[in-house]
Amino acid sequence: MDAVMSNPKEEQIFLMLRKFIGEVIGEEFAEEMEIGPDSSFTRDLEMDSIEIVAFSEKVKKYFGQQVDFPGWLSGMDIDQLIALNIRDIIEYIDKCQS
């Protein structure tokens, strides 16, 4: 894991998101990948829309109702969605919990 996070809270969020990614795409597949904060969901992790929806359900269930992941995503255009990476989600979750 090559995570370079600015604080322990962000590191904890990253570790939980990485766990969710493994659950969604398969632990064996996830272990073969270098998953870091700057990993893109579509380019690096090759997640499709169904997997992203499953991931978002896990995020909402774990982090609570204040983290409206689907609502946040719905406000993005296609280029933003394609460029979405783990760090973006960490920052969003941190902001929601502040």
Image (tube, grey):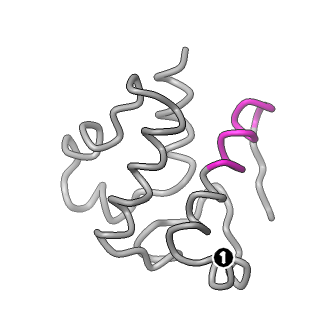
Region rendered in magenta: 6-16
Please rate how many residues cluster around mark 1, counting C-alpha atoms within 10 Å: few if below 14, some from 14 to 19, many from 20: few
Q: Quadrant of residue 30?
A: bottom right
Name which residue lies at 20% across and 40% down: 75
Residue 58: horizontal and vertical position, in percent? 47, 49
**Is 19 in the magenta?**
no
Residue designated by label 1: 27
Direction from residue 97 to residue 14 in the image, left or right: right
Q: Is residue 46 above or below residue 69?
A: below
Direction from residue 13 to residue 20 in the image, left or right: left
Direction from residue 36 to residue 61 in the image, left or right: left
Q: Quadrant of residue 51?
A: bottom left
* Picture quarter with the C terminus: top right
Amino acid type of the residue tagged 1 in the rendering: Glu
Q: Nearer the viewer, residue 16 or 86?
A: 16
Residue 60: horizontal and vertical position, in percent? 42, 39
**Is 7 in the magenta?**
yes
Name which residue lies at 68% across and 84% down: 28
Find numbered disc 1 in the image and state the secondary structure of the residue it sits on. Answer: helix
Name which residue lies at 78% across and 31% down: 7
Q: Nearer the viewer, residue 56 or 92?
A: 56
Name which residue lies at 72% across and 50% down: 15
Residue 3: horizontal and vertical position, in percent? 77, 55
Direction from residue 83 to residue 4 in the image, left or right: right
